Image (spheres, helix red, strand yellow):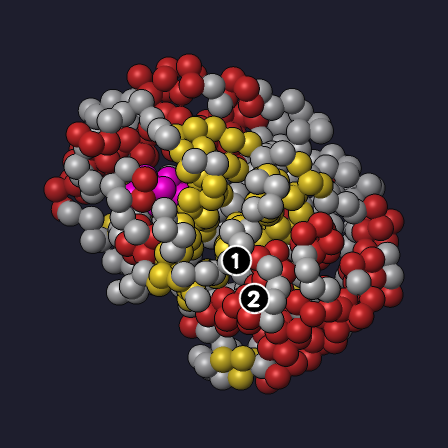
Amino acid sequence: MNKVIVGTKSMVVSPHYLASQAGEQILEKGGNAFDAAVAVSACLAVVYPHMTGLGGDSFWLTYKAEDGKVRSYNGSGRSGANITRETYKGKESIPFRGIESVITVPGMVDSWNAVISEYGSMTLEEVLQPAIEYAEKGFPLSNDQYENTVKSVELLKRNKETAEVFLPDGKVPNKFSRFVQKDLALTLKQLADKGRDDFYKGELAKRIISSLQEKGGYLTLADFAAHKGDWNEPLSSTYREYTMYQVPPNSQGFVGLMILNILENFDFSSIPYGSFEYYQLLVEAVKRSFQDRNDYLTDPEYNEIPLERLLSKAYAKEMADSISFERTIDFDSRPVGSDTAHAAVVDKDGNSVSFIQSLYFEFGSGIVAGDTGITLQNRGSFFSLDPNHVNTLEPQKRTFHTLMPAMAFKENKPYVLYGTQGGEGQSQTQTLLITRMLDYGLDPQEAISEPRFVWGRTWGEKTQELKIESRVSSNVLEKLQEVGHIVNCVESFDGIMGHANAILIDEQGFLYGGVDPRSDGAAVGK
């Protein structure tokens, strides 16, 4: 079992140890948390390529200690200007894989530039160096990448460029074999030299679009050139004496706040940790919040989302009053992809970043753009083709997004930075982590390592089971089944629960870092 890492000055957590070390390396060189976070993000795009990459999206929560301000950055892309429901005439839904799933512009590269330009003390060229080195010289292929490659072999074989990258010599590479990405290294070097605009308007953009159009893709150079991310105000609410922050829609972040607003109506001091009552409350709060999320979440520029009502304490009280310890509610939800990477950084000055990035499904669309080494996301496949659906496909629209980095503040300063991989499991795992830390006093590593559950169709499942790890007591599992949950007892540390990370900053200024034993991650403190 992992033990919590305690730092006195700084802390970096991520789902891959090399990315965490890269962040610490940037801090050692005099960079701040924002520089280190971009370095971690870029490294994850190299060393965790099944989860994330330059062809994906990202969301950021930032705190600059000097001005005491929390901000969020939306690094998600919009659908192409010429892509409509008619594009998929005759189909019931947008394909999850392949070229037809590549319909939104990748937003992560833009977000790197935005964070560095706004708050960084180093250049993009400097913070990309660790990622470039791992792409060019290689790194030990992780257990998680190996398992996902084995699972995705047929997908990876479909596209020549994809197979060349992920199935060198036509086969799954061995665990811990040196995994080299020469094309991606050249792309990163080009970005370091020419900057963000080369990805969206320059020679690199032209190569990406040329490759897509050769395969029958729909995105254009004009779509890439039009992309811009957005700085905005994060959503916030209170949970007991803490102030909780999430990124706003098109992210599902508000769901994390809704769940805590519901749970605030219950006295956890009278609810034994790990009891049936504890799990029942959390699962039922999740379900009620998901119903509203599914009704409203999309690009807020296309549909108004009644956040004031959804985040009101009065509405939370209504939902809390409807929760029973004698039965469960159920409703139909749509399968959601899950392959994501969350990370967080705090530096010696207290600057803090919690961010998350994704290709949506493992290996995204399964399409690598020509000789760029860039795997393109399939995020746009979550749009609906039903014209009456709130998240219906329209041109230049952002889709419903599961990515949701989080922060909890105590006395106006960052107290916990947290997040996880896992589709709609993200809000569920976040709730488990934060209640364990705030209500039961667990440290970040304990909170992450304890048994977890995930309800619904996350990871593309066809059933709405309550998947729960086998370390939960048999009495609790039996009671959950008795009240109506479809309980599926999974492995004791099951990868289906995602990869979580957290940093807690105590009253002495010490930093406690926790990473998921289900991942290849590391907490690096100093």
Residue 148 to residue 226: above or below:
below
Magenta residues span 430-436
Q: Position of residue 55 (x, y in %)?
A: 68, 58
Question: For this rendering, which residue is in front, 86 or 226?
Answer: 226
Please check the rendered image and state whether residue 18 is part of the magenta-colored stretch, yes or no: no
Do the numbered discs 2 and 1 sit on residues whose CB atoms are within 8 Å?
yes
Q: Position of residue 513 (x, y in %)?
A: 39, 58
Q: Position of residue 366 (x, y in %)?
A: 62, 62
Label 1 sits on a secondary structure element that is loop
According to the picture, the residue beneath numbered tag 1 turns out to be 347
How many C-alpha atoms fall within 10 Å of the one at disc 2: few (<14), some, or many (≥20)?
many
Residue 82 to residue 302: above or below:
below
According to the picture, the residue beneath numbered tag 2 turns out to be 27
What residue is rendered at 71% in x and 41% in y? 230
Distance of label 2 from label 1 (alpha carbons): 7 Å
What residue is rendered at 83% in x and 57% in y? 197
Q: Amino acid at mark 2?
A: Leu
On-image quarter of the C terminus: bottom left
